[in-house]
Image (spheres, grey):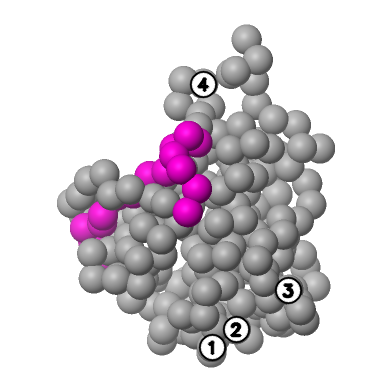
Amino acid sequence: MAFFRTVSLAETAGTIEGKGVVLRPPLTTDFDEWATLREQSREFLTPWEPTWPMDDLTRGAFRRRLKRYAEDQRADQSYAYFIFRSPDRVLVGGLTLANVRRGVAQAGSIGYWMGAPFARRGFMAAAVRALIPYAFTALRLHRLEAACIPTNTASMGLLEGCGFSREGYARQYLCINGLWQDHLLYARLKDDPQR
């Protein structure tokens, strides 16, 4: 049954172009720019992310991260992208389509981070809008899911502005910044209208 077949790597390789942004899988040559942006954004990102390991910004940890990204993509489980500003290819953040479920679900969950200097400038909205048609066509998903902490009004606005609908509330859903935090659950279906 073709509906349940996973996609081939040939269908998923390469970049995704969006309005003012380019998404592409991370490369080893991105380390310096990534580490600098993450370090200067640490205080900004800490309330919204899992606790960073002590060696998180080291070259070795970055290599391990890239290896895991490649393994997950080969297994059709997760697709990681760095987000670059189109005109000058400056790294502004990251976006991951993770927890890909095939079979009767055909779904995946998106997660993202934005560097502090680039927050609230529309880059993440452009990246999510670029990922949506790719996920529904090239990856043949039926459903995209996302979750955010209820106090993260910027993320709520982003998801709603990109056509995601709030579907529920999950108590102590993810361990963020060392604490089990409640999350609002969002989803967008393949046939939902474009925004």
Label 4: few (<14), some or many (≥20) within 10 Å? few
- Label located before the other in sequence (2 or 1): 2
Type of amino acid at the residue the image marks with label 2: Leu
- The residue located at (81%, 37%) in the rendering is 10
Circle 1 Cα neighbour tier, 10 Å, few/some/many (<14 / 14–19 / ≥20): few
Q: Secondary structure at mark 3?
A: loop
Q: In the rendered image of this protein, does residue 129 appear above or below residue 71?
A: below
Q: Which residue is mark 3?
A: 86
The answer to the question of whether label 4 and label 2 lie on touching residues, with beta carbons closer than 8 A, is no
Which of the 4 quarters of the picture holds residue 135? Answer: top right
For badge 3, the amino acid type reads Ser
Mark nearest the camera among 4 and 3 is: 3
- Residue 37, label in figure: 2
Kindly check if marks 2 and 1 are in contact, taking CB atoms under 8 A apart as contact.
Answer: yes
Q: Residue at x 52, y 80 (%)?
A: 121
- Dot 4 falls on a residue whose secondary structure is loop
Queried whether the magenta region covers residue 188, the answer comes back as yes
Going from the N terminus, do you reach mark 4 or mark 3 first? 3
Q: Is residue 111 magenta?
A: no
Q: Alpha-carbon neighbours of circle 3 within 10 Å: few (<14), some, or many (≥20)?
A: some
Marks 4 and 3 sit apart, C-alpha to C-alpha, by: 36 Å
- Does label 4 or label 1 sit earlier along the sequence? 4
Mark toward the viewer: 2 or 1: 1
- Whether residue 161 is visible here, answered yes or no, is yes
Q: Nearer the viewer, residue 117 or 53?
A: 117
Measured in 3D between alpha carbons, the distance from the residue under mark 4 to the one under mark 1, in whole angstroms, is 40 Å
Residue 147 lies in what quarter of the image?
bottom left
| Element carrying mark 2 | helix
Mark-to-mark CA distance, 4 and 2: 38 Å
Q: Which residues are magenta?
A: 179-195
Q: Nearer the viewer, residue 54 or 172?
A: 172
Q: Which residue is disc 1 drawn over?
A: 117
